[in-house]
Image (cartoon, rainbow, N blue to C red):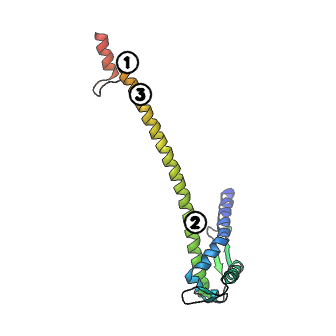
Amino acid sequence: MLFRSDTYYQFRFIKAALVKQQALLNELIQDADIRSTSWFKQFADVDADGNIIGGRDKAVKKAIEDLEDHLSATAPRDFVFIEIGMTTCNAAESAKIVNKMVEKFTASQRDLALQSIRAQLAERTKQREEVIKRRDTLEASLANIRSGTRFARLNLSDNNTFRDYMDVKIAD
């Protein structure tokens, strides 16, 4: 039991670490809802459409650094969930940022799982087609053998069996 709980803890710990991966943080920063928060506006001037005015790269870098410092994702050992939290001066914005992060993380995990399933399905479909092709080849070969074998009468009709054939031959 201890081994299973440690394995599950490691699994959740890895997932918690994935929450703070660079690609996911970049995706979060690109979200229009996040760019409309006062938290993001402290790093960049943003127009009404959510576009950054001025030094875009510098603003994004500062925002990501702040996320790395203030966004937390942990996997408590004795529980079965991942805790994600954020500290900013506005609790509502913190909740908004965390909810968006959870949304983007679950979407990325779902996409990753679907990609894996699609690859497995493609492999199984290919294997199935190969088996069907081999079966068809073997059936055609067997039909050829049956049609060319007079003594064994392996090409029996649906109403006759090999036993019926042998009974007729013995009676002759």
Mark 2 element type? helix
Q: Quadrant of residue 12?
A: bottom right
Give how far apart the Cα atoms at labels 1 and 3 are.
13 Å
Q: Earlier in the sequence, mark 2 or mark 1?
A: 2
Residue lying at the far front in this picture: please name it. Answer: 54
Give how far apart the Cα atoms at labels 2 and 3 are.
49 Å
Read off the residue under disc 1: 152
Q: Quadrant of the N terminus?
A: bottom right
Residue 154, horizontal then vertical, whole percent: 36, 22
Read off the residue under disc 3: 142
Which of labels 2 and 3 is toward the front? Answer: 3
Rendered view: 71 above or below 110: below
Could you tell me the amino acid type at mark 3?
Answer: Leu
Labelled pair 2, 1 in contact (Cβ < 8 Å)? no
- Residue at image position (52%, 56%) is 118
Rendered view: 118 above or below 130: below
Residue 85, horizontal then vertical, whole percent: 64, 79
Rendered view: 53 above or below 64: below
Q: Earlier in the sequence, mark 1 or mark 3?
A: 3
Q: Residues within 10 Å of mark 3 (few under 14, many from 20)?
A: some
In the image, 43: left or right of 169?
Answer: right
Q: Is residue 3 visible?
A: yes
Mark 3 element type? helix
Give the number of the disc on residue 109: 2
Number of callouts in the render?
Answer: 3
In this rendered view, identify the residue nearer to me: 47 or 104.
47
Q: Residues within 10 Å of mark 2 (few under 14, many from 20)?
A: few
Q: Is residue 19 visible?
A: no
- Residue at image position (35%, 17%) is 150
Give how far apart the Cα atoms at labels 2 and 1 are.
61 Å
Q: Quadrant of residue 108?
A: bottom right
Rendered view: 52 above or below 165: below
